[in-house]
Image (cartoon, grey):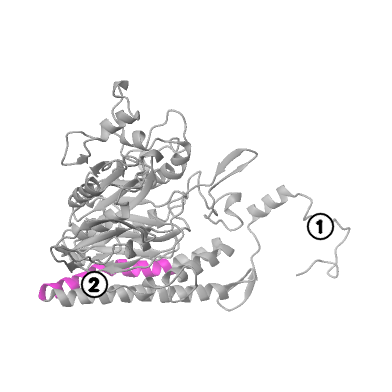
Amino acid sequence: MRLIATYIGITSLWFSLVTSIPACTNFIVTKGASEDGSVMITYTCDGVFHPILRHTPAADHEPCDSLEIRDWGGNFRGKIAQIPHTYSVIRLMNEHQLAMGESTFDGRAELHNPDGTMRYWDLMQLALQRTKTARQAIELITELVDTYGYGSTGESISIADTQEAWLLEIIGPGPGGDGAIWVAVKVPDGYVSCHANKARIGTFPLNDPENCLYSENIISFAVERGYYDPNSGEPFNFAESYCPSTPSNRKWGDTRVWSILRRAAPSLNLSPDYHRSVEGSEPYPLWVKPDEKLSLSDVFSIMRDHFEGTDFDMTDGLDAGQYGSPYRWRPLNWEIDSVEYAWERPVSTQQTGYSIVSQSRSWLPDPIGGVLWYGVDDTYTTCYVPLYCCIDEVPEPYSTGSIRQFSWDSAWWAFNFVANFANLKYSYMIEDIQAVQFELENDMISGQTTFENSIQKLYDKDPKVAISELTQYSVMRGVEVVDKWRELGEFLICKYNDGYVRDEEGRTHQVGYPDGWLDRVIESQPEHFKLPEKEEETPETRLVD
């Protein structure tokens, strides 16, 4: 028996060091709901960590090869048989355009089985290396947990291929238990769905294997544990049985779901009552039909949401500070005089390590059709770069760096520098940031069809040369974006210095504070800043700067 490289490095860099605060948001767009026929999923990997982008090459293995499964700390958890051939993977998309994302919902704490070999990140990586379609991925994931046990808490996993998009939700059986409890539903073509740290699959069809799969024990286990009473007259509901709603998970999870769905389908006029825990309010639908088919740019925009234009707009109010910042520093919840409070938790957050928007396109060969649009740090201030699923090299700035040491060589640090510096005068600097962001993303998106048409002709003649060109293009674009972001950071330092704003001619201007914020300052301390009245003020006595 030959033991191949232990399975820890790349997955530990994907998912390690995430905090206990609800993290990660996914948006699912079926091919009939997208403007160009792409199946798309998004994923924000939120947590305190420095992401390292790596490529896992395809490989052939000997019949007796096995694979060690280890946790983030390198501790041995188990060993599984290797298969003859594994596929190439770039982050969360494989060479066959299969893409994945996830969000943790935890669910009932007593169902965590710490002895289960397979954690959710193991399952995702193995499915990407071993399967070509969403349905195959679900079959493999559920076979693996049946055989080796499931060791994570509750998890929602988005899975997309060139034709279909699925949502799989899974939770453990408790310490020492076998397998897992799970359900998977296919999102109807022409619809969109999303999830954000709270189980989303409620009732589901029991006799529709084409569109819904589930574990045999999904209802019986809930009955046995007292999570569901079959005599209640109510249909079985997976989400309420295994991840009961609370005011906290509604506010942190369902508010994001509401905002994504209300932006995709404004005509539905979805009420905020459910995510505010108003008695009698109904959960949001698992999927909706968008008012208009969504473009790639639309999807980018939705993932940059802070509830703008709603009663929960994070750029407005005293808590947004002088310059309308959408950021709220952790912790999200606190107590004053035994009363608990909590900030809003938006889709876009400063704690994002990296995010993706995948495109899986059935009408193109896999190397051209699969694109992973990749960005580091906050979705609002990042710039997405296209990484084609066939590439065997990644842009160097995205594959280097450490959270312990600032470096301009690291893409993550370049984007973090710009985002953090912008907090000094947010409403001003965000306009400069988004101007560069729009210019770069618009150039890459608008040129995508022309570029891919030329690659298609090359691919028809020589696939290897075409793949080499796609690799060079992805690397070039990644390096270009980071170069522009370094320049942007240096520009912002010069333009916004010591509270002044410098114009194009180099003149400095005193811009002060917004009137509304000054009004609030005076309301809080009406006499503190007030100058004494004088009978007459002369130029000699006037207070000057």
Residue displayed at 15% across by 41% down: 210
Residue 385 counted in the magenta span: no
Residue 297 locus on image (x, y percent): 34, 59
336 with respect to 353 (left or right): right
Of helix, strand and loop, which mostly describes the magenta segment?
helix
- In this view, the residue in front, 85 or 388, is 85
- Kind of residue at badge 2: Phe
Q: Nearer the viewer, residue 171 or 475?
A: 171
Could you tell me how far apart the alpha carbons at marks 1 and 2 are, in whole angstroms? Answer: 64 Å
Q: Which of the numbered marks, if any, corresponds to residue 71? A: none
**Label 1 CA crowd tier, 10 Å (few <14, some 14–19, many 20+):** few
Q: Picture coordinates of residue 172 (x, y %)?
A: 32, 42
Local SS, label 2? helix
Q: N-terminal of the two: label 1 or label 2?
A: 2
| Helix, strand or loop under label 1 | loop
The residue at the point 81 percent across, 57 percent down is: 531
Q: Is residue 91 left or right of residue 489?
A: left
Q: Which mark is residue 451?
A: 2
In the displayed structure, 203 sits above or below 442; it is above
State which quarter of the image contains the N terminus: bottom left
Q: Is residue 249 left or right of residue 296?
A: right
Residue receiving disc 1: 531
Q: For this rendering, which residue is in front, 389 or 311?
A: 389
Can the viewer see residue 425?
A: no
- Kind of residue indicated by mark 1: Leu
Q: Are marks 1 and 2 in contact (CB under 8 Å)?
A: no
Mark 2: give few (<14), some (14-19) or many (20+) Cα within 10 Å. few
Residue 381 percent location from the top left of the image: 45, 63
List x then y, in percent, for residue 197: 39, 46
Q: Range of the magenta residues?
A: 436-461
